[in-house]
Image (cartoon, grey):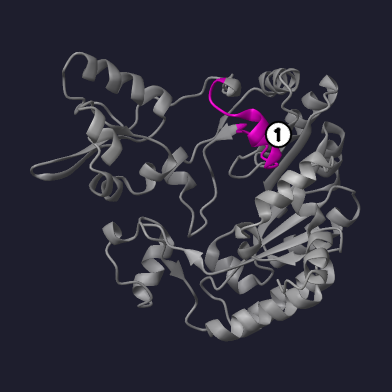
Amino acid sequence: MKTIRGKTDAKVVLGGAAVGVMPEALLRFTGADWVVLGDGEIVFPKVLDMLSKNRMPIDIAGVAWIEDTGFRINTGFGDRFSDNGLVPDFHRWINLPAYLTRFSPVPIQTKLGCHFKCVYCTYRKIEGQDYRLCDPQTIGEEIMDLEKRGLRDVEFVDNVFNSPYDHAIALCDTIAKVRTNVRLQTVELNPYFMDDNLIGAMEQAGFVGIGITVESAADPVLDRLKKGFTASDVFKASDIIQNHRIPCLWVFMFGGPGETEDTVQETLRFAEKCISKRDVALFMIGIRIYPGTELENIARTEGVLNLSPLEMLEPVFYLSPSVNHEWLLKKVYNSMATHMNFINPNAISLPFLPAINFVGYWLGVKPPLWKNTRYIRRGLKWLGMDL
């Protein structure tokens, strides 16, 4: 912002998912003029039209700003973006050779909106609670176009890929008929909507990696997180994964509401017994608290959080008062020490990870890189790096 202000007096408009979560805090932190909420494809052109006429866009739904009387926001979005053909010409914006050496796939959304009510999540606030589905045929055509441009790794970044179930099946069937050589991924599967038919359809479509965001394998925690599925669904998903060949990344978050020493050990037992060596478990400790979520209310009620929403740009995490942090760290690290396919977020921030990506790319290693976790960890351990 200092650089921009030093070169132009143009109005600065912020957009993106983050401002949908913390618009006032980001306006005050950056000193920007306006914030676009909701669907930027609808709101931003209206803002530009008003600014080009030297008029203030204060009557446009989906705009926020700060004036002398304080923070102002116009909600009640009347229009929602639902068009297809959302993949841009990446060659215009990205150094593609450099991008590809980092094992970075092209992100595609097949829908907007979320029906789920997870206590920590912001998707409903950003995208709305009603599904807006993209046409599977159009998505298939976009993937074909990406392949022609040399972009053969695609990740579906929907908040939940397999809900609605029928839409996911239709998408997989459409892509399978196209017979592309694109490698597909998603790490946003919900265990409640999983069966052999779905994973079989994903195999036929060309998926080379999937992920299941279960957070926990203990019912008390899943219930308090309002995940919408139970521990039995988690175990059922494990059985289904074992029947197929796609590598799977399991994502867990320890320390949520309802977490105790018993539930921690219950989840670790599941990971150790039900996740095969070819698959990977990612363990995270603590859950970030975002303003306006139910987790914020829980944290304030329990005395875990006393900061104001404007002070939460720096990440603030919830950890169940019923779990000792040092004990939890020790339990997780002990499990990682004996299972080379278990990792935590520290692995993602290793300073030499870009070098591993670069070497792997030129050696012909195929994404996703995480499927090679146990080999990478063993190699680093052999080099004397205790991870």
Tell whether 154 sits left or right of 182: left
| Residue at horizontal 53 percent and vertical 85 percent from the top | 324
The image shows residue 219 at horizontal and vertical percentages of 64, 71
Q: How many marks can you see? A: 1
- For this rendering, which residue is in front, 379 or 81? 379
Tell whether 320 sits left or right of 51: right
**Is residue 1 visible in this depiction of the protein?**
no
Q: Residue furthest left?
A: 68
Q: Is residue 82 above or below residue 272?
A: above
The image shows residue 253 at horizontal and vertical percentages of 60, 66
Q: Is residue 131 magenta?
A: no
**What amino acid is found at the position of numbered circle 1 in the picture?**
Val
Q: Is residue 284 above or below residue 5?
A: below
Considering the numbered disc 1 on the image, is that residue within a helix, a strand or a loop? strand
The quadrant of the rendering that contains the C terminus is: bottom right
**Is residue 260 visible in this depiction of the protein?**
yes
First to last magenta residue range: 92-110
The quadrant of the rendering that contains the N terminus is: top left
Q: Residue furthest top?
A: 53
Name the image quarter holding residue 221: bottom right
Q: Which residue is mark 1?
A: 154
- For this rendering, which residue is in front, 271 or 98? 98
Disc 1 crowd rating (10 Å Cα; few below 14, some 14-19, many 20+) is: many
Q: Is residue 96 magenta?
A: yes
The image shows residue 151 at horizontal and vertical percentages of 71, 27
Q: Is residue 257 above or below residue 38?
A: below
| Residue at horizontal 53 percent and vertical 25 percent from the top | 93
| Residue at horizontal 77 percent and vertical 46 percent from the top | 359
